[in-house]
Amino acid sequence: MPSLDDAPISGAGTRAEEVVPLAEEIATIAKRQVVTVRVQTLTDTVEELAHAEVQRESVEVTRVPIDKVVETAPAIRTDGDVTILPIVEEVLVVEKRLVLKEELHIRRRIATESVEVPVTLRKQRAIVEREAPDDPVPDR
C-alpha cells in the first residue's frame, strides 16, 4: 500500500487523513449448573398419652352448735386448715341480744392424682428430592 509520502502534492494544499474505527467482537462461553430440588412436606399423626398431675380440692362442712349469747358478731377466723364462719341470730327478749347459734367449720382437703389423656399430635417431615435439569446443555 502506498504511503502518504508517496502521494503527489499539489501546490495549494495537502491531502487530509481519514481515521477509520475498527470493531472487534469477543465471544465468551459460560456454563451454569441447574439443579432442580423438590421439597415435599408430609404430616403424620401419632397417638400418645399425655401425662399430667392434677389437683382436686374438696371441702367438708361441719355444723357445730354453740347457743351462746354474745355482744357482737364474731369475725370469720381460720384455725389451721379450718375456716370458721360464725352464724348469728337475733332473738327478741326484753332486750335484743346476739346469740351465737352455730359455727360452720370448713376444712380444705387437696388430693393429687395422675391422669392419662389420649391426645393426637401432628408431626411434619420433609422429603427432599434432587432431579436432573429438563434439557441439559452439552459441554463444549
Image (tube, rainbow, N blue to C red):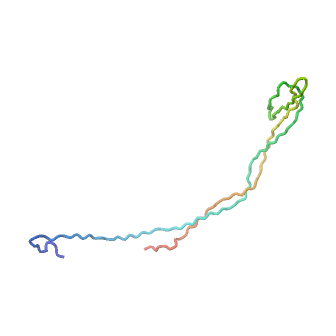
Between 112 and 71, which is closer to the camera in this rendering? 71
- Which x, y percent locates residue 120? 72, 58
- Tally the marks: 0
What residue sits 49% from the left and 73% below the top?
A: 136
Q: Quadrant of residue 109?
A: top right
The C terminus, quarter of image: bottom left
Q: Is residue 61 above or below residue 93?
A: below
- Which x, y percent locates residue 123? 66, 59
- Which x, y percent locates residue 63? 88, 35
Q: Is residue 74 above or below residue 18?
A: above
Describe residue 126's horizontal placement relative to residue 19 as left or right: right
The N terminus, quarter of image: bottom left
What residue sits 10% from the left and 70% below the top?
A: 12
- Which x, y percent locates residue 60? 84, 39
Q: Is residue 137 above or below residue 82?
A: below
Q: Residue furthest left?
A: 11
Q: Quadrant of residue 84?
A: top right
Describe residue 87's horizontal placement relative to residue 26 as left or right: right
What residue sits 88% from the left and 23% below the top?
A: 95
Describe residue 98's horizontal placement relative to residue 40 as left or right: right
